[in-house]
Amino acid sequence: MRITFFVLMLLALSAFAEVMPAASSDYALGIFGNANMDDRIDELDIAYVEGIIKGANAPTNLSDANYDGLIDAQDTDQIQKIMDGSESEITIVDARKRNVTLNVPIQKAVAVNTGALEIIRAIGVNVDDVFVGVSSYAIANGLYWPELKDQVSIAYGSPDYEQLAQLKPDLVILYKNPKKDESFDKYQAIGVPVICMDCFNQEEMDGSIKIFGELFNRRAEANGLIEWYHGYVDLVEERTRGLSASDRPRTLFYNYPESNYPLLKASNSLSGENTMIVKAGGINIAENLNSSSGVAEAEWEWLMSENPDIIVSNVVAAETKSGYSANDTALDFMKKIRDTLLNDSAINSTAAGKNGRIFIICTDLNRGPMQAAGTVFMAKLLHPELFEDLDPQSILKEYYEKWQRIPYHGIYVYPNQE
């Protein structure tokens, strides 16, 4: 029996809410074949599709596993192939809610999204074998990405489509919010599939990791990475969950004062920093600032009226600034940025300025599963008394050695919190 997917969707809309199964997690894994809309693909999805074919279940957005517009036995076959790791193509929902069908496993790729590159290396992919082009940011951080030094450098936001056509990748991975010059139509014109992935916001991270596990045939490694990452993030969230509003420091995350000051640009609810602040037991005072991205411009009068208890600012990772490649001069740079903020009259009028609770962190702490360490760093800044037993630098060392397979190195927070 074959049921036309789109017709059945219309017939079932009224009953959908009643029969829709509850997800076992807060997100639905964005892979066609995840028929019951939970956080995984398993036998329950086969059973759910069989129920659709029999008329007992309503179709869902992801039940058309082979993405041909029909719900039939071929979909259960595709789900079984995904479970076995024997599928030859797969359709995913990317961070822009675009449905993209890809041949798998990916043999040749380009990553403009450095967070994606981070995850893909962590799940055991030899990135130097697979990636023929990577972000200029990765190329510039040769100590962290030594295997990529000879790959083609791809500029963020300004793609050279002729260059990409010559590379002939099976896939290009962009950030969730592409720049205006990154045109889906132009990628289509050169015959290159493109996906946008969120590798920064913890609310989307698990799904991104699992999708990469499917695309690169590293399912077990992807699940292991998620389990490791959640071991720390969930511990922080558990300890701070019962805090009252009065016990949660009012926090401003000031984006890149090194380039934005004297403009005030703050991370709002759409940012990965917001999730870290909330899970670490803080209140993001910029959470509701209006912006189409995760960063909103604010007025200094607004900052004074909000009176934050703590201000955290980020700087880019570079040899002389912060991060894995940083040398001793990075501390001088981070101190200079902090002094600039401490000497600002508006900041000086806030509780954060008066009490010297201004910190500079490396932006990479908000990249991919490194946020396990980043969230603990944030928790130590906001609630040092609750997290005396946790050492974020040890967690970062564990991440580098176990998942990135490189030795620990670098400077990440100033002033350092022991």
Image (cartoon, grey):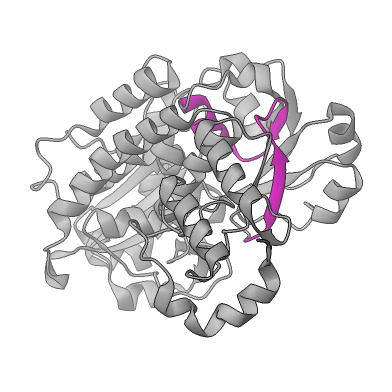
Residue found 45% across the figure and 61% down from its top: 267
Image height check: is 296 above or below 319?
below
State the image coordinates of residue 6 (x, y, percent, origin top left).
Answer: 69, 71
Q: Is residue 353 left or right of residue 400?
A: left
Image height check: is 220 above or below 409?
below
Q: Is residue 114 left or right of residue 304?
A: right
Q: Could you say which quadrant of the image residue 330 lies in?
A: top left
Q: Which residues are magenta?
A: 97-122
Q: Nearer the viewer, residue 176 or 296?
A: 176
Image height check: is 210 above or below 277?
above
Q: Nearer the viewer, residue 211 or 260?
A: 211
Q: Nearer the viewer, residue 92 or 329?
A: 92
Image label count: 0
- Residue 261 visible at all: no
Q: Could you say which quadrant of the image residue 131 lies in?
A: top right
- Residue 231 visible at all: yes
Q: Nearer the viewer, residue 149 or 117?
A: 117
Residue found 12% across the figure and 69% down from its top: 244
Report the quarter where the C terminus lies.
top left
